[in-house]
Amino acid sequence: MPDTPAEDLVKQWESVQARLRQQLVEEDTEDWQTRPGFLGLQRVGGVDLSFIKGDDVNACAQLVVLSYPGLEMLYEDSQMVTLTAPYIAGFLAFRETPFLLEALQRLQRDQPALLPQVVFVDGNGLFHYREFGLACHLGVLSGLPCVGVAKNLLQVQGVYKNEEHQSQKFGTQLRLDMQHTQGLPSGNSLQQIAALQKGGDSFPLTAASGKVLGKALRSSDRSSKPVYVSVGHKISLDTAVRLTHSCCRYRVPEPIRQADCRSREYLRVRFPAADIGSKE
């Protein structure tokens, strides 16, 4: 039986991901990444798409650039876009990356001095079914260091939510390998969750293969819910986690938080009667 059009598309996209995956760099490449206090880092970017609730085709694609370490707004770009690619789990990048890449290219063309030195992406990077999520896709195509920061846990490669032992602190319990957690003894995974007592504490998201695909990070003392950080491109996981924490005033790193807020406000002003949806 011949493949359906959707199956053909999935095969095509898997092939593209595999090809781009070969260009992925999972280590630090910039001088500022290894300097104390990220000395030399001056501009951090954030990207996001926001939708009108019930409309999964029309969206606001948002890019912001903030100063570092002050996290003050330097640049913002809001554009209404029409998504043409269908949503298929694991292939979000094919819907969103073209518009986010265009925003970065506009900035490069019009105000290159404001191009971010690193981009925070609202979504996963290496922590993905094929280890090539939205943050990796955007990173490889843009050539910029990228960090994936997800608000919800993607259940992938042996990392999953355990409903039987829910943590009062986070609402979900993760099945993770205690042996890979620095400073913690092996044993009940509740110990792992309880160890995230202050902003900056983290533990690895370890696949069934033993590979660490990302880290759960308590990003702020103000929020007990972790975010899930993974490498996008041209940055190591440890550096990505430290940088994410340094950019957090609240739970979500400020570049992503501002991109989300600005894109929602853009939609509210232009569609005042609409219910602005969330990517949560």
Image: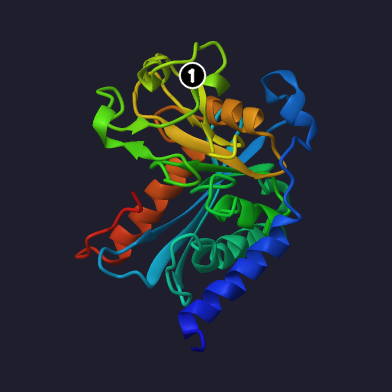
Q: Is residue 165 above or below residue 82?
A: above
75 and 58: which one is in front? 58
Q: Residue at x 44, y 67 (%)?
A: 88
Q: In the image, residue 209 lies at what x, y percent?
A: 59, 39
- Which residue in the structure is indicated by mark 1? 201
Residue furthest to the left: 273
Q: Residue at x 64, y 38 (%)?
A: 43
Query: For the residue marked with disc 1, what is the amino acid?
Result: Asp
Q: Which element is circle 1 on? A: loop
Q: Is residue 22 above or below residue 52?
A: above
Q: In the image, residue 267 lies at what x, y percent?
A: 33, 61
Please tell me in which quadrant of the rendered image residue 52 appears. bottom left
Q: In the image, residue 120 lies at what x, y percent?
A: 56, 43
Residue furthest to the front: 1
Q: Residue at x 51, y 89 (%)?
A: 2
* Residue 37 falls left or right of residue 173: right
* Residue 141 falls left or right of residue 185: right
Q: Residue at x 27, y 66 (%)?
A: 271
Q: By what rule are the colours in the image chosen?
A: rainbow
* Residue 257 falls left or right of residue 91: left
Q: Is residue 136 above or below residue 221?
A: below
Q: Is residue 245 visible?
A: yes
Please tell me in which quadrant of the rendered image residue 34 appears. top right
* Residue 265 falls left or right of residue 1: left
207 and 204: which one is in front? 207
Q: In the image, residue 111 lies at what x, y percent?
A: 69, 55
